[in-house]
Image: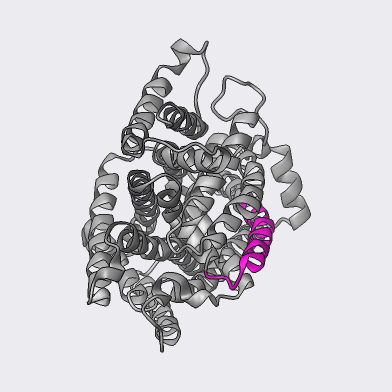
Amino acid sequence: MNPNIILIIFLVYFFILLLISNFTSKKSKFNDFFNADRSSPWYLVAFGMIGTSLSGVTFISVPGEVGNSNFTYFQLVIGYLFGYYFIAKVLLPLYYKYNLISIYTYLKNRFGIYSYKSGAFFFLLSRTIGASFRLFLVAGVLQIAVFDQLNLPFYFSVFITIVLIWIYTIRGGIKTIVWTDALQTIFMLSSVIITIYFILFEMNISFVQMKDLIISSELSNVFVYDWKESNFFLKQFASGAFIAIVMTGLDQDMMQKNLTCKNLQESQKNIFWFCIILVFANLLFLTLGALLYIYSDFIQFEIPNRTDTLFPLLAINHMGEFAGIVFILGIIAAAYSSADSALTSLTTSFCIDFLDIEKYKSKKRVRLYVHIMFSLILFMVILLFNEINDQSVINSIFKAAGYTYGPLLGLFLFGIFTSYKIIDKYSILVCFTSPILSYIINNYSEELLFGYKFGFEILLLNGLLTFIGLFIIRK
């Protein structure tokens, strides 16, 4: 595919985002960057959250992972629904009750300053790692499609990607992102649907034939009943529920969008419709994954060792120019819809939770410096990840989340479901010890637990250890 065409698409797409940014940031007040003046339409937030939740990881990594684990990823998705119910009925009422901008302020009110800073720190760590993984994907695709052919290094594609995000988020913040994410969700889902249609057309099969073809193959296996396996159904179900709680309900990035709704009822309505769309969207991506492997066999294409590259290689090199353009639009939309809000939420959390930005005279300048700082941090982490990653990115994200979100899970559950006060200064020790203990137990689980292998449910162990640690240091 001609790299100049891809570059033009990229620049036109960015220009559209910039127009939206200029439109939404007109007459913006300083706090609109953080909460959009609590005026976002709930349906816009719900639809835009799909793009943020799925991101470039789902767009590329989930279809590729179908070859390794079939449709077992859907076990997690089923668990998500219970997690989102908890968010709507327990967490959102809590956040609206205290009129929070940063959700970690709750920990300050409940336990004290050390717990508050610990929670905010683990969010910054979690979101930095997650956003870097996601941006790594889009930078890798741009590298394959454009910059390799122009003999430009990988760090250049990473730099360009981050700079463009920085430009259109610096003024409007979350007020801009609510709108751009909705647009990017449309592009992402349209790209998947068009690609599925293209494969069916190329193979000359109907939708009904596609369904029968996928069901009759091993790729459609959903449930795993061997309790020792890392993707055993009950493990995946429980992991999905708690992943939804921590990566949405305890995540400033996702909750910042919800808290821009006018009131609690609209925010809860947003979560309800978001769940419905999310289930169908994930089924769409899994279907695409199965079709990619079936199509590869049809054209006798050799499956790459790194399954994350299957979709990009087929779309750009084997499906024709139109399919390649559709793919590029989809991956850019998927990656940007997640990364732009991540950069904004990192800036928000650091400004409010660590700098107490209201005390500064030049608040806009401070916010600008923080925005630049996190852009540079993401840049460095992506380059590091490029050197060490050797597995599916979707697995990498959930593994990292298990260790970094665990302390947040323990802190919030202990605060919500107990009435104990704690010796606050020791909470830092608890929050840092729990992930270390979880890592050690995970490494030796087969020897200690009769062959049991931890999967994503390492998050539950980590949260439990944090909960126990907080119980020990209770007053």
Residue 199 placed where, x, y %?
61, 57
| 270 on left or right of 335 | right
Can residue 85 be seen here? The reply is yes
Residue situated in front as seen by the camera: 1 or 120: 120
Q: Residue at x 44, y 11 (%)?
A: 447
Q: Position of residue 58 (x, y in %)?
A: 51, 52
- 184 over 253 or under it: above or below: below
Which residue is at a point 24% across and 56% down the rendered structure image? 377
The residue furthest front is 475
Q: Is residue 266 magenta?
A: yes
The image position of residue 29, as x and y in percent, is 39, 82
* Residue 218 falls in image quadrant: top right
- Is residue 77 located in the magenta-colored stretch of the structure? no
Magenta extent: 260-282
User: Is 201 on the left-hand or right-hand side of 65?
Assistant: right
Residue 149 seen in the current view: no
